[in-house]
Amino acid sequence: MRIAGSIFFAIITITLIYFLDNQLTVGGQKTPRLGYFLSPQKGFWQNAEPADKKYNADIHLPQLSGKTEVYFDERLVPHVFADNEKDAWFVQGYLHAKFRLWQMDFQTYAAAGRLSEIMGDSANGISFINIDKFFRRLGMVYAAEKTLQAIENDPRTKSACDAYTAGVNTYIHSLNEKDYPVEYKLLNYKPEPWTNLKSALFIKYLAYDLAGYDEDFEKTNAKSLLTKKQYESLFPYVVDSMQSIITTPLPKLVNVPNVKTPKNVDSVYFDYKTQIEPLNEAIKPNKNNGSNNWAVAGSKTKSGRPVLCNDPHLNLNLPSLWYEMQISTPIFNTYGASLPGAPNILIGFNSTSAWGLTNSERDVKDYYEIQFRDSTMQEYWFDSSWHTAELRDEIIKIRNKKSDTEHIAITVLGPVMYDPHYPDKLHTNKYYALHWVAHEGSNELATVLKMVRAKNYTDYIEATSTFQCPGQNFVFADKAGDIAMRQAGKFPALWYRQGDFLKPGQDSSYMWQAYIPDSLQPVMLNPERGFVSSANQEPYVTRTYPYYIPGTYNLYRGWLINRNLSAMHNITVNDMMQLQTNLYNLEAEKALPLFLNNIDHTKLDENASKYLNLVSSWNLMNDAKSVGATIFSIWMDSAIHKVYDDELNGNNPNIPIPEVEPSTLVSNIIKDSAKLFADNINTPEIETIKDDITDAFISIIPVLEKAKNNKSLEWGKFKDGGVPHLLGLSPFSKLHIDAGGGENIINAFEKYHGPSWRMIVELTDDINAYGVYPGGQSGNPGSKYYDDFVDTWAKEKYYPLHLYKEDIIATGKNLLGKMVFSK
């Protein structure tokens, strides 16, 4: 019996060792290595931080040439005082890694198309292998390698990146297993060394997020379904009431590139109404990635000094996209929002000036059909001869499985993103190369490193002159009283509708012929109206601009910002806070009267009439408690589908079509051009716009009833916003935030997207600045500083931002610690 008992317990022990030391498959998903994850010495228990934790350290490192002191204020914001700039970037890298290592690492895995290495080929219905293939074929590594070359060729940027990378790696090498962020323990992998290429990948991931949206395939399909008149009505180039960012007159057109439209453009390119069959859905960045920024001159403010405001609208995640900090050196003293992954203060201010960014929304991606000699893709036909393609094998490692290899050909027009082995969205079985400005060697970090030391308007112009991709609207203000706006970026000079559709790639006639010169990208400096602003609208007055400037421009936010700023005087910081969090729905102001005028009340039952009365009496504010905002949002979406779907996809939701903007429907109703689409081509009756608007309203009643029964009819609950963890882990997320906002609202908080950093800077002698972001300084879910800013942000409150002198903060109260770095 003793022997049997010993064998039994030995079997139990061996079984436990196996189960605790291996990942198990449960419900089709892999668990963490439970023995490691649950270990009191190394597991997730070690990630819990005491509420009163202090962040003190005295660190001696041979890489440093001077002394750096870091003071953590009561919100865990570090104030870095370095003897020299190189040490400052080293310490920033160290701090980014200390508080955001897993986030930095995971995002560069995604950018490089390497998620399958750590996640496996799929999990929770997400195909990581498809995501990896997409980013490999998009040319992210290829683009990052070119950006790295540009960084290496600039001594200042190379020095900053080398120091930053050394700082990150110094922290990584100091870690024991027990110190790894909890996500490494959950996913059972270890951090790898940081490199300058990873920083370049991070920059390219931003380029994808902000300049990676395209609808070339969708628009090509729409072109095949519509007449030219219908297409121009549905996707107009000139949008009525659009207020451009730069309103100053263009300079005389002297020695500017003359772009020529190909002779065969009508037969080869503008071939309307010849339907293409659809299939695949593609990965895309959020179309609403945008922002608001503005600067008001001292002539309009109570203090007599400029006030600059910025709130970039991006995907909201935990750990947060941003890491707030101050960096002071003998050369500059700057404060603002940095992005963990590279040396930067991207949006912020220094001792004399402030700056902010919004996305240009310009289309800088084109697809070309390539003719290869055969399926080996070794040679392609271009300009009347065969050319040799560069072949690149992208090996994708897959956790616990055999690696996959993507064979990618690179042509003079760019990498071949789609081929018969990786079909395009229309499933044409053709080869399409991608030409994207982000593929070209550029050094956006050079601009960032210059802005932190910019003292005046001249420095601002010099800093932004080399910025390429993603194109950005740089707002600027300084203590001298200057305010300015400039759209900086590298943009192709295009003929009308060039790049909207798929293009022939057999010769150079459809290529970009030139880039728009600086002389035609003017700066708006100290305008008479007393302010500059941008909110992702078109950059210039398109009717007079010599080139086609396609993009996904927003109409309403810029219009409303300008309307408010024009009427305001004696402006204070508090006024700017109220404007930055404004919930007024200008889209509804323009659309709702048209909808109400086109309702057939005889078709409404008592229940529908009740909801119509609610939206009719709505105050047009998208606040959390509003029911009218919920009704209008659903009605607008339903109306767009009711009016346009039959022409665009025959009511087949699988057909890829471009998004129709609400402003287009409003404009078409006003112009009576909606009648081009009002009749449902799939029915024998002749429908009118009144029929469509009425039917659209009736169709949403069940949705509203369901929301009412679920107690989610109020806008904040219906929208159900939140800040999810990057892995979608609910316990690590901040969900069900009951707050207002929405698409086309100045306060653009949607579901998991919105103002990712709010900043207001008044350029008084002692700078008066405020800011907040929906996250926290720590990336550790076990820290009280992980998401402690979210509630403040949701309540539309702000924290003061202090550009301290070291002797002031050194004696301050409520410090959470001090770290000293020295040789």
Image (spheres, helix red, strand yellow):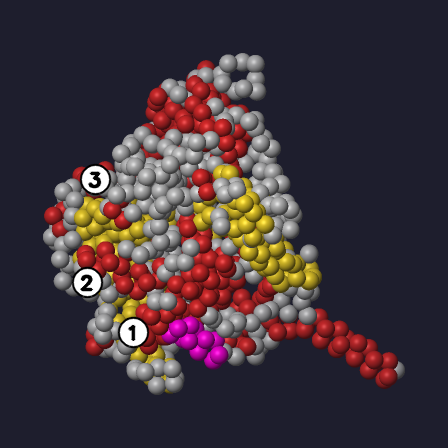
Type of amino acid at the residue the image marks with label 3 = Lys
- Disc 1 is placed on an element classified as helix
Q: Is residue 506 visible?
A: yes
Question: Where residue 334 sits in the image (x, y, percent)?
Answer: 26, 66
Q: Earlier in the sequence, mark 2 or mark 3?
A: 3
Where is the N terminus found, in terms of image quarters?
A: bottom right
Magenta stretch contains residue 163: yes
Distance from disc 1 to disc 3, alpha carbons, whole Å, reads: 42 Å
Type of the residue with mark 1: Glu
The Cα–Cα distance between marks 2 and 3, rounded to whole angstroms, is 30 Å
Instruction: Give left or right: position of 713 versus 35.
Output: left
Q: Determine which residue is flagged by label 1.
A: 85
Picture layout, residue 435 above or below residue 672: below
- Magenta segment, which residues? 162-174
| Rendering coords of residue 326 (x, y %) | 29, 68
Cα distance between the residues tagged 2 and 1: 17 Å
Provide the secondary structure element on which disc 3 rests: loop
Q: Position of residue 652 (x, y in %)?
A: 58, 30
Q: Which residue: 82% across, 77% down?
A: 8
Question: How many C-alpha atoms fall within 10 Å of the one at disc 3: few (<14), some, or many (≥20)?
Answer: few
Q: Position of residue 314 (x, y in %)?
A: 40, 51
Per the image, the residue denoted by label 3 is: 252
Question: Which residue is at a point 64% across and 51% down the rendered structure image?
Answer: 376
Q: Nearer the viewer, residue 180 or 409?
A: 409
Residue on which disc 2 sits: 455
Residue 271 numbered tag: none
Q: Quadrant of the C terminus?
A: bottom left
Q: Which mark's residue is nearer the viewer, 2 or 3? A: 3
First in sequence: mark 2 or mark 1?
1
Q: Main secondary structure of the magenta part?
A: helix
